[in-house]
Image: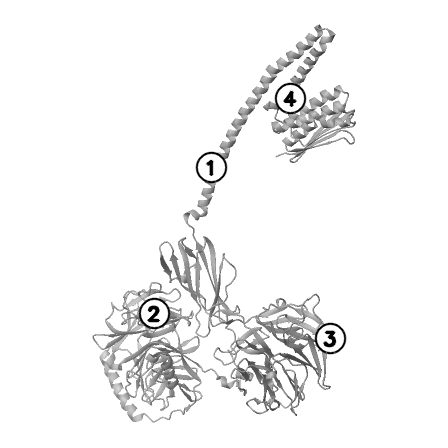
């Protein structure tokens, strides 16, 4: 069945494949002849749309992939869903994040490509909806599938079992089905195959190339196969059973435009110079636009996007706006750009257009190019001020009632009359020696312009001095009603100049209470408070002050109170109700003047060394909406007071880089804004600036490689695949240096990185452009690497990543080893202590046995001898005459006394008496036996003593002897009738108290009555002995038990 239509540009035929290929071919060839004859006879002359030339609004710029010059031979490119650009090349596989690139090759130790054939290269690339990347390898013998997330080959399809192709072109469905078009080496046959990983590929469609002409391109689009040939377009259903054939009016050369699949399938019909479009729902193609004759380009690449037609090859580049019918010829600019940057690639082939991050890019065979809007010219915003110095530094600006705008600079004033575009030197100062004056504030109050210390009548030109002038000394103005208030840097007074009366008064500024210094020497800005009774003052180093018109300081905020570093102080102020906005070194601050709370909004910049630095705010100028234009040390920015966010101009905008100046920001009555810089004056209308909002979202932060150096083996190991599935990095003890490579892809913005290693330090690093993180000598333990990425070096919008790290320990550093060693050491120590105590116990038992034996021997032997001596001497005294009896009785008494002392010694030595109860019993017996002889009553009390507790023999003996000596002294030298004895222990403290109710009969004789021995014994046992005679004889022994 043949259906012929659309014969104005050619013919389109619909076919259903039959079993008779011969009848099919005959009918097809007849149809082609019929198409050609009809085309020649019926093709009318069509008038193309009229396109007009316009100056290029776009430009082509090189986009560096950070590859060395010998890495050439790029073939195709795709951008994966995670934002990376994959480029197939003759040297390997290039993956770029927009700021740097890595190349996977067969011999790269860190980034191996993993192909079977080391000489193979990556050809055409395709992408499915799941983010997998497909590629033909070398001559097209097989197709591979890359897992883009984990960067490894997952699957391979080969033609070895199917045919011997001389060429292969392939495409992928969104679901990952691979279709390939192959052309045989031995015949003119071409085939479409559905690839199978087992090698048993399914034939979908097959025919002769002679029937359709030379094949130029194959694509899968809208569930159909599309083949571009030199004779026409072949559209085949997905199952290969039906197809449509659209023929050109004439055969095309092989170097024609390559078809492009966008929202439709677009192709170029050279005979009619028409770009046609077709899709799966249309019976035949339709004309999209006709390329004007002036565009003499018939081959290369084209793309249709947003009603724009892009045409390019190695020599030409045109952009046609099909909606407004304009042409931009970028050919010469592109040629000049290549000549400047890549002189060896002037005629480089263009392989295709690509949309990367919603931007248009051209892929060449060697380099990548970006199509972008041209930045505005500096001259469009620069308000030229005539002056002999090229680096003119601007200061205050003002406007009079006639809408003349005045601009001051070092050292003069320029005027822009109403209706005039440029500034000119203001006539009253043309012949004035302005070098004696240093510009800062500029204030207009009809009809006077106040510049520095001068009052200049704008109508008559008369100049009057208002306050004393100091050469090169800045003067700050603030107008309050009809009074101009002035402050001269390094002064101590405010000047009040009455404008109508021409009178000057001064107000001494009182020092702050308790302050030893004068008022701040530098004031950058003064503004009225809400009721105009005082001034808010921004100082260079002392913060912000509220000063009354009488010179009293009402409020004071130091730089520390405002979160500002002292590098620049406070540069500008803006009052907004109860809030006071201020600009300084760290950013833009908002102070609540009621509760003294502040918020600091930071907008860091990146230095040329790619390090994060604060943005210094010099001027704050409100707009008519809800924000501020802000002049900073690096360009003009905008702050939105509803979102509390900064927005920025494009980095190439002429207002994005100048260093703007203090007190040099002004909005005139016509709504034009002026900002003075250290190198000229700029002006603009709000609609002329486009501030870019903060990035709404970033691509995921990806770890794509880890390099680990083993200090013992002196070599690296690399981890570059399956990192998306890495849940923890386990390091060996000898792996001392670890290098992490991370990135967030972006082809629009710079990306900055900050990191910390939780477990070592919690402080985040400053943002920097280097995505490489080096970690050295981690001690054994568990850590977490945390990384965040930002497009503006702040935490407004970030992409984050974290990876747990386990640094294992050497065997001798492991916990179980230390536990085992501790247990072994503890066992040895315990054994030694037990042995020592056993030996000590044995020695103690032996000593006790010896003490018992000695005490027994003394008691039995010496005691019996002394007892016998006493008895015999007493018996003998009975038989003696009275005159001789006395010595014998003394001998008997001495024997008994010796026996008594010997009993004390035996008691002290006897190990069976080493308890408190033995000491108490001995003391009680001695007191009862000796005090009753003298008819002295006594009480004996003890408290806190454990009678069964062991007491040292030495302590026991000395306590007893001290007690005994005290009782003996009472008996011999006191007339007491009662004695109180108290023996008490509290904790580790013990006290023995002996107190009687008598008086010492011989007060002077106490020193020789054993007192010295008592004190000596107390010292021996580390005790303290106190003896007193007030209110009776009193002896107190105190000691600390250890």
Q: CA distance from mark 1 to mark 3?
A: 85 Å
Residue at position x 44%, y 72% in the image: 746
Q: CA distance from mark 4 to mark 1?
A: 44 Å
Q: Which residue is mark 2?
A: 93
Q: CA distance from mark 1 to mark 2?
A: 64 Å
User: In x, y percent, where is residue 363?
Assistant: 36, 77
Q: Which residue is mark 3?
A: 550
Query: Which one is in front in this view, the residue at disc 1 or the one at disc 3?
Result: 3
Q: Which residue is mark 1?
A: 828
Query: Which one is in front in this view, the residue at disc 1 or the one at disc 2?
Result: 1
**Pick the front one: 487 or 176:** 487
Q: What kind of element bears circle 4?
A: helix
Quadrant in the rendering for residue 709: bottom left
Residue at position x 71%, y 26% in the image: 1008
User: In x, y percent, where is residue 342?
Assistant: 35, 79
Side of 374 where 233 appears, left or right = left
Q: Residues within 10 Å of mark 3 (few under 14, many from 20)?
A: some
């Amino acid at each position: 069945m043949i259906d012929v239509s659309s014969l104005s540009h050619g013919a389109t035929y619909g076919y259903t494949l039959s079993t008779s290929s011969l009848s099919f071919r005959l009918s097809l060839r007849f149809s082609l002849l019929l198409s050609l004859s009809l085309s020649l006879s019926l093709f009318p002359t069509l008038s193309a749309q009229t396109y007009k030339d316009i100056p290029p609004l776009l430009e082509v710029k090189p986009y560096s992939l950070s590859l060395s010059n010998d890495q050439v031979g790029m073939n195709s490119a795709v951008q994966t869903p995670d934002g990376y650009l994959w480029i197939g090349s003759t040297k390997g596989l290039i993956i770029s994040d927009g700021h740097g690139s890595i190349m996977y090759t067969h011999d790269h130790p860190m980034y191996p490509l993993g192909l079977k054939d080391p000489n193979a290269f990556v050809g055409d690339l395709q992408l499915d909806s799941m983010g997998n990347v497909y590629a033909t390898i070398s001559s097209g013998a097989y197709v591979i599938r890359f897992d883009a997330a984990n960067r490894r080959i997952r699957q391979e399809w080969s033609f070895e079992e199917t045919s011997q192709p001389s060429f292969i072109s392939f495409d992928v469905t969104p679901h990952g089905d691979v279709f390939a078009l192959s052309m045989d080496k031995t015949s003119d046959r071409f085939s479409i195959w559905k690839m199978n990983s087992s090698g048993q590929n399914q034939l979908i469609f097959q025919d002769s190339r002679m029937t359709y002409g030379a094949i130029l391109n194959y694509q899968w689009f809208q569930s159909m196969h599309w083949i571009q040939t030199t004779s026409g377009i072949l559209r085949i259903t997905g199952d290969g059973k039906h197809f449509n054939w659209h023929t050109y009016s004439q055969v095309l050369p092989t170097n024609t435009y390559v078809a492009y699949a966008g929202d439709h399938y677009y192709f170029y019909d050279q005979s009619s110079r028409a770009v046609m479009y077709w899709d799966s729902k249309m019976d035949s193609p339709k004309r999209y636009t006709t390329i004007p004759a002036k565009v003499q380009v018939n081959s290369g690449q084209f793309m249709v996007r947003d009603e724009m037609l892009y045409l390019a090859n190695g020599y030409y580049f045109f952009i046609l706006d099909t909606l407004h019918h304009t042409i931009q010829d970028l050919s010469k600019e592109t040629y000049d750009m290549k000549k400047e940057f890549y002189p060896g690639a002037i005629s480089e082939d263009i392989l295709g257009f690509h949309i990367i991050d919603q931007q248009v890019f051209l892929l060449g065979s060697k380099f990548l190019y970006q199509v972008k809007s041209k930045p505005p010219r500096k001259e469009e915003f620069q308000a030229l001020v005539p002056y002999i110095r090229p680096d003119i530094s601007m200061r205050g600006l003002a406007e009079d009632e006639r809408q003349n705008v005045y601009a001051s600079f070092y050292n003069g004033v320029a005027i822009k009359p109403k209706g005039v575009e440029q500034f000119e030197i203001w006539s009253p100062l043309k012949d004035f020696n302005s070098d004696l004056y240093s510009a800062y504030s500029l204030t207009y109050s009809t009809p006077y312009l106040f510049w520095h210390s001068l009052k200049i009548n704008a109508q008559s030109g008369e100049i009057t001095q208002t306050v004393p002038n100091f050469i090169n000394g800045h003067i700050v103005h603030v107008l309050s009603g009809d009074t101009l208030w002035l402050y001269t840097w390094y002064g101590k007074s405010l000047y009040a100049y009455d404008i109508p009366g021409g009178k000057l008064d001064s107000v001494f500024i009182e020092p702050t209470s308790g302050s030893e210094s004068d008022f701040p020497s530098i004031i950058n800005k003064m503004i009225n408070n809400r009721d105009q009774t005082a001034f808010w003052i921004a100082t260079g180093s002392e913060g912000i002050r509220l000063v009354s018109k009488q010179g009293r300081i009402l409020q004071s905020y130091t730089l520390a109170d405002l979160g500002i570093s002292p590098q620049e102080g406070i540069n500008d102020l803006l009052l907004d109700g109860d809030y006071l906005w201020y600009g300084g070194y760290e950013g833009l601050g908002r102070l609540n003047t009621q509760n003294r709370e502040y918020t600091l909004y930071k907008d860091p910049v990146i230095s040329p060394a790619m390090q994060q630095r604060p943005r210094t705010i010099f001027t704050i100028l409100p707009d008519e909406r809800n924000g501020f234009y802000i002049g900073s040390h690096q360009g003009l920015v905008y702050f939105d007071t509803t979102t509390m966010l900064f927005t920025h101009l494009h980095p190439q905008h002429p207002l994005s880089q100048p260093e703007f100046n203090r007190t040099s920001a002004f909005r005139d009555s016509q709504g034009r804004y002026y900002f003075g810089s250290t190198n000229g004056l700029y002006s603009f209308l709000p609609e002329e600036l486009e501030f870019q909002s903060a990035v709404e979202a970033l691509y995921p932060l990806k770890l794509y490689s880890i390099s680990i150096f083993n200090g013992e083996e002196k070599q690296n190991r690399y981890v570059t695949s399956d990192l998306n599935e890495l849940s923890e990095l386990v390091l060996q003890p000898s792996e001392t240096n670890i290098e992490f490579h991370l990135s967030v892809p972006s082809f629009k913005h710079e990306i900055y990185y900050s990191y910390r290693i939780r477990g070592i330090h919690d402080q985040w690093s400053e943002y920097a452009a280097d995505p490489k993180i080096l970690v050295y000598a981690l001690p054994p333990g568990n850590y977490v690497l945390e990384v965040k990425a930002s497009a503006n070096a702040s935490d407004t919008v970030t992409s984050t990543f974290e990876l747990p790290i386990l640094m294992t320990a050497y065997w001798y550093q492991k916990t179980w080893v230390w536990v085992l060693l501790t247990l072994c050491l503890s066992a040895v120590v315990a054994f030694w202590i037990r042995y020592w105590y056993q030996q000590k116990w044995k020695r103690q038992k032996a000593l006790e046995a010896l003490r018992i034996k000695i005490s027994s021997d003394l008691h039995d032997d010496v005691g019996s001898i002394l007892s016998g001596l006493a008895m015999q001497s007493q018996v003998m005294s009975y038989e003696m005459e009275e005159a001789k009896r006395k010595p014998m009785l003394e001998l008997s008494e001495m024997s008994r006394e010796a026996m008594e002392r010997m009993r004390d010694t035996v008691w002290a030595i006897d190990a069976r008496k080493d308890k408190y109860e033995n000491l108490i019993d001995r003391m009680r017996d001695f007191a009862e036996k000796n005090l009753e002889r003298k008819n002295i009553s006594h009480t004996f009390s003890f408290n806190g003593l454990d009678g069964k507790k062991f007491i040292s023999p030495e302590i026991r003996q000395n306590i007893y002897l001290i007690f005994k000596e005290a009782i003996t002294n009472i008996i011999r030298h006191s007339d007491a009738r009662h004695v109180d004895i108290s023996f008490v222990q509290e904790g580790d403290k013990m006290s023995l108290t002996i107190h009687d109710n008598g008086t010492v009969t011989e007060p002077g004789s106490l020193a020789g009555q054993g007192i010295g021995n008592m004190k000596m014994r107390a010292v021996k046992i580390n005790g303290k002995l106190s003896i007193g005679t007030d209110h009776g004889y009193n002896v107190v022994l105190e000691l600390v038990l250890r």
